[in-house]
Amino acid sequence: MLSRLGRAAAAEPRRFAVAWLIVVALLGATAIAVGPAFLTNITAPDSESTRGLAVLAGEFPGAGGEPATIVFKAAGGVDDPAVRRVVSDFLEEARRVDGVVNLVSPYSPIGAGQISEDRTVAYARLVLAADLTTDEGEAVRDELAALAPSDPGIEVAYGGEVFRERRPPSSETLGLAFAVLVLVFTFGSVLATGLPIATALAGVGTGVLATALLSNGIEMPDFAATIGVMIGLGVGIDYALFIVTRFQEYVAGGRSIPDAVAAALDTSGRAVLFAGVTVVVSLLGMLLMGITFVTGLAVAASTTVLATMVASVTLLPALLGWVGERIATTRRGGLLAAVFLAVALVGVALDLPLLRGAIALALVAAILGRVWSPLAAPVTLSSAVQQERSLSYRWSRFVQRRAAVVTAVGVVALSLVALPILSIQLGFADAGNDPEGTTTRRAYDLLEEGFGPGANGPLLVVATLPGRTDPARLGRLGEALVGVDGVATVSPPLPNDPTAPTAALVEVIPQTSPQSEATTQLVHRLRDEVLPVLAEDTGAQFLVTGPVAANLDFSDYLAARIWWFYGAVLALSFVFLMTVFRSVLVPLKAVGMNLLAIGAAYGIVVAVFQWGWGGALLGITPGPIEPFIPMMMFAIVFGLSMDYEVFLLSRIREEYAVTGDNSTAVADGLAATARVITAAALIMVFVFGSFLLEDTRTVKILGLGLAAAVAIDATVVRMLLVPATMELLGDRNWWIPRRLDAVLPAVAVESAGRAGQDPGVVG
């Protein structure tokens, strides 16, 4: 089936290319007409905090929604008549901004506690619509900023997720630049470089457009598309790279272009499908968590991976058929132009005018490549496979001769790198982790300066009162919380009805910051010890909510369910590899080594983002690791590591089927795939690493974690542990009980494989 698809695409490249253009155009037009609906807030699963928010929304319509603050500082004091007049006028205008549900001024009776003791800092409490999309949130932010007072004696800062500054993303451009350089040095051909880039861009573009449409029906956070682009670029270029490399082998072996495309698709293309499905299944495993925004992330990432996978087996064969034998011929001027283009892309991504000027050099090189003989002379590239094979073969033999030592050293080294995970602190970063100089970080610092660290993470205690409660009793509800260990201040209870209240709201300011373990202990103390006693005495029902409590509930919810997710992904991966390679020990080793690689990546993330090692170089303030990050990293890394596992082991299995010699098959399989796996890993490392330039901390963490995981997987695991352990086990690698072999379905990743062999026609 795949060979027929490849042959048809190579024979009719224009039809396939036009079909892709039509699909992208229709998706683009629909996406523009409908528009995306990404959300800035994260919906937590059912918990005490979400039930408290529901009570707030029902009993206190002005208090339920997305919280934000506008913080003021006046050296002469916020009570100065001129300052008070300017700020009050601004707040009245801010109250009327579309998207603002409620605003509590520090000059109102209810907001009297929103002025610091020294009277120099004050803040207005905002409640924004809970369902604001990213674009609507940016509109609110821009409108409030335009209304802000321009008096130099009044400093204004904005706190809240909606006010976080988001620069236009440049990481994709930087990742593409590095990918171009790696492909140029890998292939030495402009066309061979351009095809994987074009295929990946087509797949990612289609995936992003589809994600934007899906965001209207599935709750997706605003960084979901960025994560989809990150993963899609990496796997898209890699998938195309594997197919192009195999195509070159078949062309060099004397195949016609249609036969070479068909054979490449039936071998590496088949492996791409298996690898892509593995990544998608691993990502969709996050649906087991039962959290809407996690479902959105899983759908966004898997949609983009699916689109790039489809592009690799439909659009790429058409492009290969169109290029034909020209893929092995290039001009020196073209190669020079490609290098200058990559340099210019780096300049664009990093905003370096000097490097951006390389685009002019790229144009000059391209023109001279047509007219000036030293650059215009075509260069026919001979296959570098034999030279690379020789080097990789010698490396494999070196490792195999020292298999026991290499295995022990590799396992110990990865275990040591993974050690920081033992001290991982799961939690949500806040504005205190934002870069200095941003308005959200300044608002955080001003609140801490004026009101103490707990002011940035107030706890909201919602009381549902029995019957017709005497308003005079409400004061005693607040008094009962004042002496609790860890509580700094308690606001007077706010009734939902001054005359016949049925609910009351009390704001509790902790003594410690939102990320402090002491604040977490305070939440548990209130829920487990203080409020149950108070409920017995008063007959009221109490719920602790607010951002800090919601984050804690979210972390606890994930911690209780994440092992089911891990187990499901591990079990599916084991069964998949066992089915494909007809072995028990190979998938066991693969799962174990992938766990080591992921653990090491976790350790690096904790050391950098939690401990702060090297954080200053990356513009990172130490803080907790978002609780969904380990889950996402596991899904993505395990899926991607299966890619390399499939590509390498399928080639080893192929050689073993021909020779029956395990040791030689390992060396030949590694030699045949080392060059392309190394290039693919370099591209992924650069693409993922470039996302450290993003403003969103979550994206930064994933970028570093995925880059580290891929680097470890492609070096320590694939180039050391795989050949060493397979040498130690020998022919036992391919052992499988007969009864189990009979039960498993017959699945082949590659129908044949060597460049000189006919892969046959697969129906």
Image (cartoon, grey):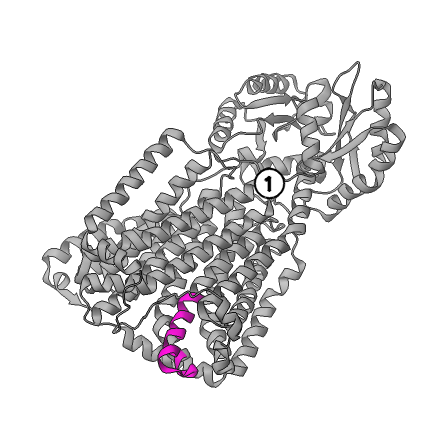
Q: Is residue 343 among what the camera can see?
A: no
| In-front residue for pair 704/566 | 566
Q: Nearer the viewer, residue 573 or 748?
A: 748
Would residue 41 appear left or right of 756 to someone viewing this image? right
The residue furthest bottom is: 401
- Camera-nearest residue between 389 and 112: 389
Q: Magenta segment, which residues?
A: 645-665
What residue did someone put label 1 on? Answer: 431
Q: Is residue 653 magenta?
A: yes
What SS does tag 1 mark?
Answer: helix
Residue at horizontal 34 percent and vertical 54 percent from the top: 177
Q: Main secondary structure of the magenta part?
A: helix
The percent coordinates of residue 63 (x first, y second) are 66, 25
Toward which corner of the image does residue 64 lie, by quadrant? top right
The type of residue carrying mark 1 is: Ala
Residue 597 shows up from this direction: yes
